[in-house]
Image: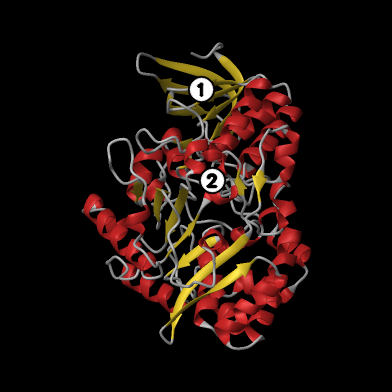
Amino acid sequence: MPARDAYDAVIVGGGHNGLVAAAYLARAGRSVLVLERLGATGGAAVSTRPFAGVDARLSRYSYLVSLLPRKIVDELGLRFAVRKRSISSYTPVTRDGRAGGLLVGGGESRTRESFARLTGSQAEYASWLRFYEATARVAERVFPTLTEPLPSRGELRERIADEAAWRMLFEEPLGVAVEKHFADDLVRGVVLTDALIGTFADAHDPSLQQNRCFLYHVIGGGTGDWDVPVGGMGALTDALAAAARGAGAEIVTGHEVLRVDSDGRAAEVAYRTDSAEGRIAARHVLVNASPEALAGLLGEQPPAPAEGAQLKVNMLLKRLPRLKDTSVDPREAFAGTFHIAEGYGQLATAHAEAAAGGLPTAPPSEIYCHSLTDPSILAPELAASGHHTLTLFGLHTPARLFREDNDGQRERLLTATLAQLDAHLAEPLADCLALDADGRPCIEAKTPLDLERELRLPGGNIFHRDLAFPHAQEGAGRWGTGTTRANVQLCGAGAVRGGGVSGIPGHNAAMAVLEDLGSG
């Protein structure tokens, strides 16, 4: 139970952003209480052993790190590390009856040769370099702003100082730039996939949802690299919880917050446990939950419903499968992002089919193998015997497709998705799956509705709502975490510059609170 009846700050939710905020506020000498509904902290950034009797700790929900600023790791003194993947991506394809693929990574010469084999010339690779040189310039200039007060749209444009890149990313549908820069359908698809992670949109969607998703996927760390968390994602949230507690924050689990009453100057938080109810006074409240949950706590009109659009599959293999493309080692192909059914035309077809109300006939997805980069998540005997994890993330499967029959649709989608992978394997994936202690294959799949039920992600949306461009937005306040109450901050993924495992909303909400406390 909480040790006090009043705090400088009460944080609702012990996910990674809430823990970041707690650590910063406690380190500043403020009294801090974190109330977590579940029995443990971490939210979606956790490591678990999902398969009975098998000692493999998988990053069950969130699984890669790109947007976490080094600034947060250093300032909080986190004992946490990431490792670079040796390969960026591999995309298998069959052309003219021959199995091949596009390998990006393993050195500049190998990447150049792979493009030439796929496309027949050096032109596409030259375009690739020009395109990503432009996004790299944007990343270098935008990423540092994410932990600063929000710039205006004009200020961000001036900071980027590249009108062509600004137009490509902030004004025109991304499909315009993809089609302008690239001719090969497969190359176009590989580029576009970063715009569709958890985002149900077409390349030419006038809302620019795809642009916003793409931007956050190419600016992380100022490089756009997506790295492997050593020890799994739970290693990060464990380190954050330790940092928060070490600085003096209280963290209590099994406490579900029911309501937040605030007049803008003082607040009261009502909660319940399995055996009791209580109320806590606070000068500030930080809500590490969705905008929908925030509205419910404040008794306000909820925002428009959010909708997720992904399939998440976790697997443990007794060995990596052999590939039909014998020019690449499976240990390299699966080390990066292994793209499946993600040609440009295939992505458009899948979106159109889902928009019409059906599961995609050829579901697009991407896979990577955590244990190739970080074998520490496996028990030594599993690693020694060649076992490996696989994480699959499927695209273009909006929550609406599962409302009437979640279990049946999950099974049908999983079957169709694995069939697309099997088409590029020299042996069925099913033959490579490890078995748990009960003799069942080590595979689990989660639809948007499963994520909604397990994590309270609205509609299963991994970003809590549509991503926003990282500049000033109405009502978001100076740090992008403001709400309708001056002393209530939104520090979850739904804040401006939220989404992904970044800690940025937690940092920014804490900065907003410290500014107010410093002036109060």
Residue 64 x/y as whole percent:
56, 49
- Residue at x 43%, y 43% (from the top left corner): 292
Residue type highlighted by circle 2: Ala
Q: Is residue 401 left or right of residue 342?
A: left
Q: CA distance from mark 1 to mark 2?
A: 23 Å
Q: Quadrant of residue 22?
A: top right
Look at the image and tell me whether residue 62 can be seen: yes
Q: Which residue is mark 2?
A: 493
Task: Tell me if residue 267 comes above or below residue 506 in the rendering.
Answer: above
Packing grade of label 2 (10 A; few <14, some 14-19, many >=20) is: many
Q: Which residue is mark 1?
A: 268
Residue 410 x/y as whole percent:
28, 54
Look at the image and tell me whether residue 487 can be seen: no
Q: Is residue 450 left or right of residue 84?
A: left
Residue type highlighted by circle 1: Glu
- Residue at x 42%, y 22% (from the top left corner): 254
Which color scheme does this rendered protein use? Answer: secondary structure
Task: Tell me if residue 208 comes above or below residue 491 in the rendering.
Answer: below
Give the quadrant of the C terminus. top right
Residue 302 x/y as whole percent:
41, 45
**Callout 1: helix, strand or loop?**
strand
